[in-house]
Image (spheres, helix red, strand yellow):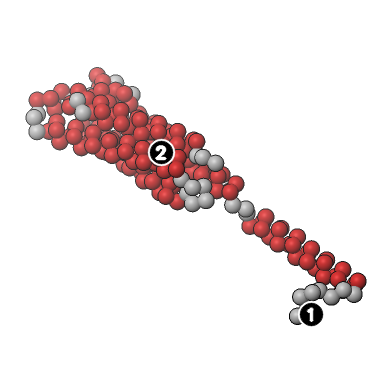
Amino acid sequence: MRHILSSFLALHWAAVFALLAFICIDGNRGVATALGVLGVPVQNTRFADLENAVVVAPLVVAPLAVALLVVAVLFCWAFVEALTSDTTNPDPADSVMRIAFISALGVLSLIVIGGAAQGINGLFMIVAVQLAALLASYVAVLAERRSTVAAAAPGTGEIRAAAHVMAKAAAHNSSLARISGRLDSRDDR
């Protein structure tokens, strides 16, 4: 069974972070627009001071765009792994998905820290909503993975029940052979 929800969520988050990275390329205005896409009112941003600073703007914009792009690439990788992973060995896809979600949480946390340093109003609540959405996505991915693994592998109770039925059948056959006087062909050797 393919991981439909996992692949859809990985593709969704890859598109979101790639879009944010693409928007951030446009310098100081791009960061304000990216924050607007996230839901922060653009009027509350205090990036007017950064437009005059030739040195500070590239130091903020380039690493943010690169970090968002790295997260988008990780989610693309998780998407490919979700499509091509084997249901009996989901460990590679799980590790890539885990790394993608952790890096996304890290980038959003850095956005909150940077926004607090710049004095951007309303950023904490917006990023908290995004973090909650990432967490809900990760829980959904884990639930899908575990249900797939549970469906593929029999449980310990099922194995014990099957062994119990087989042992009972062997004991029954042995008792019937002794009662009827037939000896098992393996005992004659």
Q: Can you give x and y, in whole percent of width and height, for residue 13 in the image?
A: 38, 33
Residue at 36% over, 37% down: 76
**Residue 186 location, quadrant:** bottom right
Q: Residue 178 carries which label?
A: none
Q: Is residue 120 visible?
A: no
Q: Is residue 27 visible?
A: yes
> Which one is in front, 162 or 43?
162
Q: Can you give x and y, in whole percent of width and height, for residue 23 in the image?
A: 25, 26
**Residue 8 location, quadrant:** top left
Q: Which amino acid does label 1 sit on?
A: Asp
Q: Which amino acid does label 2 sit on?
A: Phe
Q: Which of marks 1 and 2 is nearer the N terminus?
A: 2
Which residue is denoted by mark 1 in the rendering? 188
Residue at 42% over, 50% down: 92
Is residue 170 shown left or right of residue 20?
right
Split into 4 quadrants, where in the image is the C terminus? bottom right
**Residue 37 location, quadrant:** top left
Within-10-Å neighbours for mark 1: few <14, some 14–19, many 20+: few
> Which one is in front, 48 or 140?
140
Residue at 80% over, 68% down: 171
The residue sitting at the bottom extreme is 189
Which residue is denoted by mark 2 in the rendering? 79
Indicate the secondary structure of the residue bearing disc 1. loop
